[in-house]
Image (spheres, grey):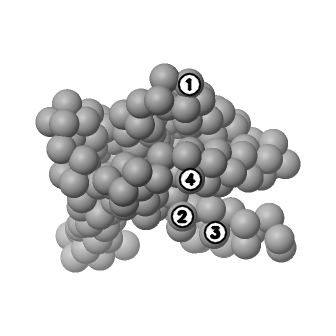
Amino acid sequence: MTGTILNAVTAAVMAVWPFFVLYAVTNGLMTLLLVGTACVLGVRLALAFAGRGETARSGRLLSAAGLVLVGLAALLDEADWMLWYPVLVNASLLSVFGASLFSGMPVVERLARLGLRGKPLPPEGVAYTRRVTAVWCGFFVVNGSIAVATILADDLTLWALWNGGLSYVAIGCLMGGEYLYRKLVKHV
């Protein structure tokens, strides 16, 4: 239970983390930002080591990579290294979703089967979830590319706005759009 709560809290903190970066960098609070980020990523890394499966493996890799970025930012006294974390998140999700298309069960199919509570997923449902998984792969490529573009634009406010807000709106639009398509067009 404690692990679930810690996962939820650290995930929520990382969701709004770009705004912490914006505030800390513009107000000279780099040390506080580095320590806070390292603590949150350290907790996420410990929780990932306590877990099993693909999600835990990718969580370990992502948390460790985030800690490397924090270390580089501290060592080189350059906050820009931390701006690459959202790019790593998208690359990690792309690798998980993409790999699932080539081995095992696609991620969206796994999620669909959880919702069925043991009922079988029909063959057309299997094909559909495979296509939706591929759409998510495309989304992660586009979202990660936009994250890179916000770094290269050298505008911290733009970076925080996209990576801390608008990217979540885009995720919500894709999820909502897929749900409406499934209900209104596919009738499932």
Earlier in the chain: of badge 4 and badge 2, it is 2
Q: Is residue 48 above or below residue 172?
A: above
Identify residue for label 3.
8
Amino acid type of the residue that numbered disc 3 sits on in the rendered structure: Ala
Circles 4 and 3: CB distance less than 8 Å?
no
Can residue 9 be seen here?
Answer: yes
Percent from the top left, x then y, of residue 137?
Answer: 35, 39
> For numbered disc 3, what is the local secondary structure?
helix
Amino acid type of the residue that numbered disc 4 sits on in the rendered structure: Leu
Earlier in the chain: of badge 1 and badge 3, it is 3
Q: CA distance from mark 2 to mark 1?
A: 24 Å
Identify residue for label 1.
75
Tell me the quadrant of the picture where the C terminus can be found.
Answer: bottom left
| For discs 4 and 3, the disc positioned in front in the rendered view | 4
> For numbered disc 4, what is the local secondary structure?
helix
Q: CA distance from mark 4 to mark 1?
A: 15 Å
